[in-house]
Amino acid sequence: MTKIGVLVSGGGTNLQAVIDRVHHKSGEIAVVIANNAEAYGLTRAQNSGIPTAVVLEKDFEDYDAFNAEIIRTLKDKGVELVVLAGYMKIITPAFVEAYPNKIVNIHPALIPSFCGEGYYGLHVHEAVIDYGVKVTGATVHFVNEEADAGPIIAQKTVEVADDDTPESIQKKVLEIEHTLLPWVVEQYCLGHITVEGRKTKITSEQ
Ligand code: GRF
């Protein structure tokens, strides 16, 4: 079974969705790491008997040392796939090098729109409304050295209605994230995902 490490910063509803669909089935979540001791994702992990770790940036002399500790914890648990599930920190080049095309992230918009620096949380959905797009959605992608720029694995859309607010779009998008992310993690664990340059392929039916 593929060993998975999940990184969270907050509520962890995506983590829960991955636990429900993947844990002890196609993969095993070996550790959940949070950069914030209050992250509710830690409680979700503990409720499922999954080991947890809290790694706080303030305890390290710099950002590289903080990331080195996260990588060390993942390697120590034998993690083969890293899942960023609402993890609010930038991934360093050393982290990408330690897990090349083995880190997946979920972004609450259709990359390459509304992504990159400053596009997180409700800011994403505010920008969607301000621009006036008619569809938005969620993207799961591999992580490379640039924010939200690695090879795209899967995307799913939702419609933007005239009376939508950033909050209502956030809710709709989060709902599709909860099926998209676990499905991608499952497909990865089953060995169904291949990557060539920027192109990924999933060799099974969705
Ligand atoms: C999700 O919208 C995800 O796309 C973004 O952060 C949010 C995390 O929510 N990266 P949760 O912690 O999984 O509930």
Image (spheres, rainbow, N blue to C red):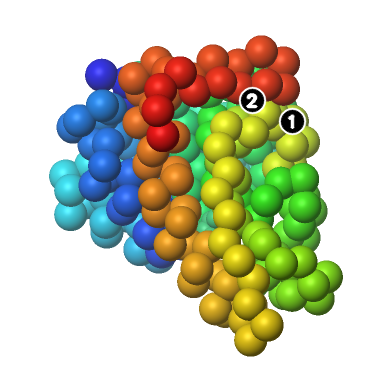
Q: Position of residue 129 (x, y in %)?
A: 74, 75
Q: Residues within 10 Å of mark 2 (few under 14, many from 20)?
A: some
Image quarter in which the N terminus is found: top left
Q: Position of residue 163 (x, y in %)?
A: 63, 86
* Residue 58 visible, this orientation: no
- Residue 156 or 139: which is nearer the viewer? 156
Q: Position of residue 66 (x, y in %)?
A: 59, 39
Going by the image, does 72 lie left or right of 24? right
Residue appearing at x 56%, y 21% in the figure: 201
- Residue 28 or 136: which is nearer the viewer? 136
Residue appearing at x 64%, y 25% in the figure: 96
Quarter of the image holding residue 148? top right
Decide: marks 1, 2 in contact (CB < 8 A)? yes
Q: Mark 2 vs ligand 1: CB under 8 Å?
A: no
Residue appearing at x 49%, y 23% in the figure: 202
Tag 1, which secondary structure? loop
Quarter of the image holding residue 93? top right
Q: Position of residue 10 (x, y in %)?
A: 46, 62
Label number found at residue 96: 2
